[in-house]
């Protein structure tokens, strides 16, 4: 449900065992997107490019080892720096649907590694509060870093 309707039927659906981090394919799709019906932490429904699957697998295994979010981020960054894990390329989409109150319900995220306000013309001012009111606009997070991305709240 996190995907635009025309992409849903062809997406692969996967889950990760919270105790082991093992990946299970519930439904094999035919497009390049993978979805998790309840991605921890937070229970969000998430969908992303299959290019992000190795990172998701690593995160699931580290989470199963009871690592903190900070420890997971540090290990992922080390794997990227070592060249054993690739970041999704510029323009890769990530889709999130929240099922709980107090967070942006529909959020699309566009990966723009190393982008800045000057290079792509997107503000870094958070639109979270406006998005919770149904009036959010895109904003750039982590500008100038390999993890830079544009948050795109989809208003209802």
Image (cartoon, rainbow, N blue to C red):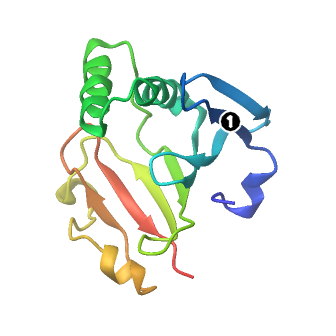
Residue 21's image quarter? top right
Along the viewing direction, whichever of 22 and 95 lies nearer the viewer: 22
Please say if 74 is above or below 146: above
How many residues crowd around disc 1 within 10 Å: few (fewer than 14), some, or many (20 or more)? some
Q: Quadrant of residue 4?
A: bottom right
Residue at left 43%, top 66%? 152
Query: Residue 49's x, y, as percent?
Result: 57, 39
Residue 133 vs 98, above or below: the answer is below
Q: How many labels were placed on the picture?
A: 1
Residue identified by numbered label 1:
14
Q: Please tell me which residue is depicted at 36% across the width and 57% down the height of the picture.
A: 150
Q: Position of residue 24 (x, y in %)?
A: 70, 27
Judged left or right of residue 59, residue 49 is: right
The residue nearer to you, when weighing 152 against 55, is 55
Q: Residue at x 27, y 26 (%)?
A: 77
Image quarter of the N terminus: bottom right
Q: Looking at the image, which is closer to me, 147 or 123?
A: 147
Question: Is label 1 in a helix, a strand or a loop?
Answer: strand
Left or right, 71 with reference to 51: left
- Residue 97 place in picture, x, y as percent: 56, 62
Relative image position of residue 64 (x, y in whole percent): 46, 27
With 92 as the anchor, is 38 left or right in this view?
A: right
The quadrant of the rendering that contains the C terminus is: bottom right
């Amino acid at each position: 449900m996190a995907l635009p309707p025309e992409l849903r039927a062809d997406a692969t659906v996967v889950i990760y065992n919270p105790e082991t981090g093992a990946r299970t394919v519930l439904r094999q799709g035919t497009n390049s997107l993978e979805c998790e019906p309840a991605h921890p932490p937070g229970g969000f429904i998430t969908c992303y490019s299959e290019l992000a699957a190795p990172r998701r697998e690593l995160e699931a295994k580290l989470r199963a080892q009871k690592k903190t979010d900070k420890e997971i981020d540090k290990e992922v960054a080390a794997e990227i720096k070592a060249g054993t894990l690739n970041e999704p390329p510029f323009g890769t989409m990530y889709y999130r649907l929240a099922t709980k109150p107090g967070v942006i319900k529909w959020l699309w995220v566009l990966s723009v590694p190393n982008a800045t306000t000057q290079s792509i013309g997107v503000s870094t001012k958070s639109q979270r509060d406006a998005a919770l009111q149904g009036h959010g606009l895109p904003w750039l997070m982590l500008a100038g870093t390999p993890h830079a991305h544009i948050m795109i709240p989809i208003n209802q």
